[in-house]
Image (tube, rainbow, N blue to C red):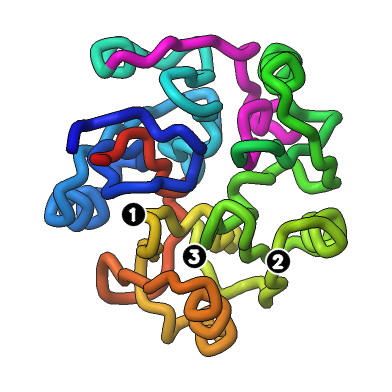
Amino acid sequence: MKENFLRIPNSPEGKVSLAAAGNYPKIIDALENEGIKTLSFRNKILSEEVSRHSDMLLCHTGGEYIFCEPKLNTDILTKEGFTVNFSEELGEEYPFDVKLNTAVTEDHFICNKKSIDKALFDFFIVSGKKPIFTNQGYTKCSVCFVTENAVITEDNSIYEALKDTSFDVLLISKGDIYLSDKHCGFLGGSTGKLDKNTLAVTGELKYHRDRDIILRFCEKHEVEIKELIKGRITDIGGILPLKEMR
């Protein structure tokens, strides 16, 4: 085996070796214990509660290609071999903070057409991916990939956009994910794949009212849950797998 870029964003085929995740020390330590090197970024323009969130600052489009907020220090990504493309600058307020917040699969990208960065949108169209439009701008935050075509979301507009497609989509209750003292978070921002059959969660599922429903959905798709730390589930901006061993 050797280290490769993920061919399909968010959906590793082997064991993840490199991921982007917010600089939350307990999570970083837990990922290191899983053999995963972690890259963390920050943008001071965004509000403090999301300034470290990788799903706000990056969008891996597959292979070596990645889009980033232009004020990020991307030297470490270049050293890792990525071809870095830059979006427009982000703004503090919605919808200017979600230009890169897009959920990507091999064949599709799920986004809010009104808020996605134009260069990123054009890149996907040229590469042959088909858009699925939703009213939710925090799209990647709101999509937890169990497999490439099986997702969990709290958002009704994402559920409605996906329910009659090839995706298997589970709609769960809102409110049980911690983001800050002001706002609740999303399961997509609290999870990420460690390998094809393992989904990491940044806390214990017992703190979510839909624990049993989530577990059954994951079992249906032959995916196990790995609880990285004890305590409530926290939205850290997702764990974005970037490289894998295969």
Where is residue 130, by image quadrant? Answer: top right
Q: Is mark 3 on a helix, strand or loop?
A: loop
- Predominant SS along the magenta part: loop
Q: Mark 1 points at which residue?
A: 195
Relative image position of residue 118 (x, y in whole percent): 75, 15
Alpha carbon of mark 1 to alpha carbon of mark 2: how far?
20 Å
Task: Tell me the number on the disc at residue 169.
Answer: 2
Q: Which of 47 and 207 is in front in this view?
A: 207
Where is residue 182, by image quadrant? Answer: bottom right
**Residue at position x 58%, y 63% in the image:** 184
Q: Nearer the viewer, residue 70 or 220?
A: 220
Quick check: 118 above or below 181?
A: above
Q: Does residue 181 show up? A: no
- How packed mark 3 is, by other alpha carbons closer than 10 Å (few <14, some 14-19, many 20 or more), is some
The total number of labels drawn is 3
Task: Name the residue type under label 3.
Answer: Tyr
Q: Name the residue under label 3.
A: 178
Alpha carbon of mark 3 to alpha carbon of mark 2: how far?
22 Å
Quick check: 16 above or below 163?
A: above
Q: Is mark 1 on a helix, strand or loop?
A: strand
Q: Between disc 1 and disc 2, whose residue precedes? A: 2
Q: Which of marks 3 and 2 is in front?
A: 2
**Residue at position x 19%, y 57% in the image:** 30
Q: Between disc 3 and disc 1, whose residue precedes? A: 3
Task: Name the residue type under label 2.
Answer: Val
| Residue 111 covered by magenta stretch | no
| Residue 86 covered by magenta stretch | yes
Left or right of 230? Residue 138 is right
Which stretch appears magenta?
81-104
Task: Name the residue type under label 1.
Answer: Asp
Relative image position of residue 52 (x, y in whole percent): 41, 37
Left or right of 8? Residue 80 is left
